[in-house]
Amino acid sequence: MAYYVLEYTLVDGYAERRPAHRAEHLQLARAAHERGELLLAGALGEPLDRALLVWDTEDATPVEEFAAADPYVRHGLVTRWTVRPWTVVVGGRTDGAAP
């Protein structure tokens, strides 16, 4: 297993546009969390321009599939998204690997 970070860049007016798609987004996120893939997720504030989702999966495929299915992405609330591996050295499940 490996850690990945999914980073969303959010559209201006995200907070006002989010309610129409929030239930479906949360349903996807909760399902991924229940499978043990999605560990943490939420928007960064001040300014509300990005969101981070932390994953623990074999590879990036489930993360990319989540982003492609996410209504926030499909309906233009996310202007850009990236998936990056994350080497964790303190906390979580560490393997002693150096950053």
Image (cartoon, rainbow, N blue to C red):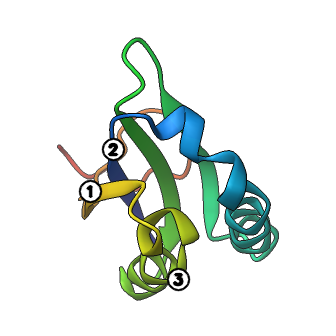
Along the line of sight, the residue nearer the viewer: 77 or 64: 77
Most extreme residue toward the top is 46
Q: Position of residue 75 (x, y in %)?
A: 47, 69
Query: Left or right of 32: which side holds 89?
Result: left
Amino acid type at image mark 2: Val
Report, in whole angstroms, how far the alpha carbon at label 3 lies from the one at label 2. 18 Å
The residue that mark 2 highlights is 11
User: To which quarter of the image does residue 25 belong?
Assistant: bottom right
The residue that mark 1 highlights is 79
Is the Cβ of the residue at disc 1 closer than 8 Å to that at disc 2? yes
Q: Earlier in the sequence, mark 1 or mark 3?
A: 3
Along the line of sight, the residue nearer the viewer: 87 or 31: 31
Q: Is residue 85 above or below residue 61?
A: above
Q: How many marks?
A: 3
Name the secondary structure under disc 2.
Answer: loop
Q: Position of residue 60 (x, y in %)?
A: 36, 80
The residue that mark 3 highlights is 69
Q: Earlier in the sequence, mark 1 or mark 2?
A: 2
Query: Left or right of 41: which side holds 19?
Result: right
Amino acid type at image mark 3: Ala
Q: Position of residue 72 (x, y in %)?
A: 51, 62
Report, in whole angstroms, how far the alpha carbon at label 1 lies from the one at label 3. 14 Å
Amino acid type at image mark 1: Thr
Q: Residues within 10 Å of mark 1 (few under 14, many from 20)?
A: some
What residue is shown at x 36% (from left), y 56% (from top)? 78
Q: Earlier in the sequence, mark 3 or mark 2?
A: 2
Along the line of sight, the residue nearer the viewer: 55 or 53: 53
Q: Is residue 72 above or below residue 54?
A: below
Q: Say which quadrant the C terminus sits in.
A: top left
What residue is shown at x 24% (from left), y 61% (from top)? 84
Q: Is residue 25 above or below residue 60?
A: above
